[in-house]
Structure formats: C-alpha cells, structure tokens
Amino acid sequence: MDLLGISGTEYVGYLASFMVLLSFTMKDVKKLRMVNMAGCILFVIYGFLMPTLRVGLPIIIANAAILGVNMFYLAKRK
C-alpha cells in the first residue's frame, strides 16, 4: 500500500516516532510511559516489517527492552 509515495511500513515508523516524541511532552509520568509504550510497540511492529529480520532486529530488541522498562516502572508505582 502506497499513499503519497510512502509505504505502509514507513507510516508505521513515522507513527512510532511521533508517539515517542509525543511522550516527551507529557508532564504526568504515567501518561508519558503509556504513550511511550505505544510508540515502542509500534517500533517493534515496524522492526518486524523490515525487509529482513537482520535489519529489523536492533529496532525490535531496543524497543522491546524500553517497553519492558516502562512496564516495570508502571507496575512498581502501584
């Protein structure tokens, strides 16, 4: 699927980047972590959409780790 010359994979990457950027504007730490987690999940999906796993694996590993950190601190707060 190409829309305006941008592939669906690229849209997922742009949306993930936007979500992570948006999370840095949050004052409430819980909201920050939730929005950042959404960005991380999108980045993991984006990594799996890469042409080969070799290309996407660093994206998947880094964002899965950040997702885990966010989940840990959200659970710890309760």
Image (spheres, rainbow, N blue to C red):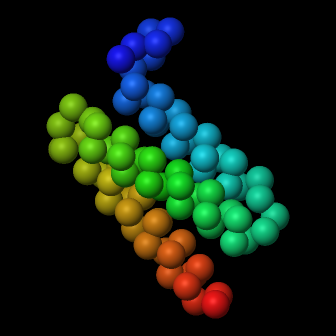
> From the viewer's perspective, is 13 left or right of 51?
right
Residue drawn at x 77%, y 59% as measured from the top left: 26
Residue at 65 percent of width and 47 percent of height: 21
Observer-nearest residue: 62 or 18?
A: 18
Which residue corresponds to the image point at 36% horizontal and 17% vertical from the top-left?
Answer: 1
- Left or right, 28 with respect to 51, comes to right
Q: Residue at x 67, y 55 (%)?
A: 23
Query: Could you tell me residue 64's position as x and y percent?
Result: 38, 63
- Residue 54, located in which quarter of the rendered image? top left
Q: Residue furthest top?
A: 4
Q: Which of the pair 51/78 is nearer the observer?
A: 78
- 37 relative to 30 in the view: left or right: left
Position of 4 relative to 58 (above/below): above
- Determine which quarter of the picture holds residue 65: bottom left
In the displayed structure, would residue 73 be above or below residue 70?
below
- Residue 52 position, x and y percent, is 18, 37
When asked about the image quadrant of residue 10, the answer is top left
How many discs appear? 0
Instruction: Report x, y in % for residue 13.
Output: 46, 36
In the image, 45 versus 53, the foreground residue is 45
Please provide percent x and percent y for residue 19: 60, 47
